[in-house]
Image (cartoon, helix red, strand yellow):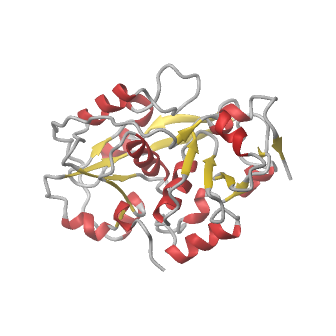
Amino acid sequence: MTLVNPQFLVETGWLAQHLDDPSVRVLECTVILHPDPDRGYRVESGRAAWEAGHIPGSGFADLPQDLSDPDSALRFMMPPADRFAAGMSRYGVGDGVRVVLYDRAQNMWAARVWWMLRAFGFDDAAVLDGGWRKWTLDGRPISSAPDAPRSARFVARPRPGLFVGKEAVLGTLGDRAACVVNALTEEQHRGTGGVTYGRPGRIAGSANVPARAIVDPKTHAYLPPDELRKRFAQAGVLDAGRVVTYCGGGIAASSDAFVLFLLGHDDVAVYDASLSEWANDPSLPMETG
C-alpha cells in the first residue's frame, strides 16, 4: 500500500541529492518542551541546537517567535496572515521555492509548520521523514555554518477550515459522520498520567491515535503506509467524513492531520487551541477512563 499524497514527505536520500539546488529551501522547526507542573511545558527555542549542528544550507524557523500569535494567551496559536508571511519571507520562502521542513522531535514541529503553510495557501512544502534523527542515522552531512541570507516574497492565500476553534469541535460531537482525534498519549487520553493542560482526560467521545505511535521510535520516520492506515482505521477515524485532530496545543495534532492527508483524507482540521483551551473551560465536555 502506498501513500495517496507522497510528494509531501521526502526521504533523506532525496534531500542529500538536492542540498545544492537553489530552488530548495530547508528549514529546521524544532522547539524544545520541558515538562512544567504549572503550564504543562516550558518552551525553549531549538536555535542553539541548530547552531551546534544542522543539515547543510538549512535555516532555522522560530515558531514561538515568528510564527505564532503574539497577542494570544495560548502558546503556538496561528498568527495573522501578515505576520506569517513576513516570517516566511525572511526565511527565504515564496513562490518558486520548494520547502523541506525537519525537526528533532518525531516530525511534530515540521508537520505543524507544514500544516500552517498549507493553511496559508502554500503547497510546495514537504516534511523530511524522520527529521534530524534519520538524517544522522543515515550518515548524512552536518554543518554548523551560519545561514546565508535569502530573499523571497511569501504571499499568504488563506484557506479557511484547516484550523478550527471550539465551536467547530462542539459541532462534531454526536455527529456520526465526523470524528475528533486526540494525538496525545494513551495515558493522557485516559486521564491517568502524563502532562495535563487543565482538567485531565479527553474531549468527550474522541478517539485516540497518539502522534508518538505513528513513528518508528528509533528513526523517528513515519510508519509504513499500511501500518499508518491500520492505526487510524482501528480508532474508527478512516470511516469519518470529517476529522478534527487535537492535542495540548495543536502540535502533535498537526502530525496526525498531516499523516491523514498523506493517506488521502482531505477533510481534516486541527483544533488550534486544543486542550489548552478546552480543558480549562468547565462548560466543555471531557471524560476520563
Residue at (56% x, 56% y) in the render: 256
Q: Quadrant of residue 88?
A: top left
Choose between 116 and 139: the one closer to the eye.
116
Is residue 86 among what the camera can see? yes
Residue at (52% x, 34% y) in the render: 43
Please provide percent x and percent y for residue 58. Answer: 25, 49
Q: In which quarter of the image is residue 151?
A: top left
Residue at (61% x, 53% y) in the render: 242
Q: How many labels does the image show?
A: 0
Please provide percent x and percent y for residue 281. Answer: 76, 28
Residue at the right extreme of this rendering? 289
Q: Is 61 located above or below residue 281 in the figure?
A: below
**Lateral position of residue 217 relative to residue 15, left or right:** right
**Lateral position of residue 93 relative to residue 193, left or right:** left
Q: Is 26 located above or below residue 209 in the figure?
A: above
Residue at (74% x, 35% y) in the render: 279
Residue at the top extreme of this rendering? 71
Choose between 12 and 239: the one closer to the eye.
239
Residue at the bottom extreme of this rendering? 1
Please provide percent x and percent y for residue 79. Answer: 44, 29
Is residue 195 among what the camera can see? no
Please provide percent x and percent y for residue 182. Answer: 67, 51
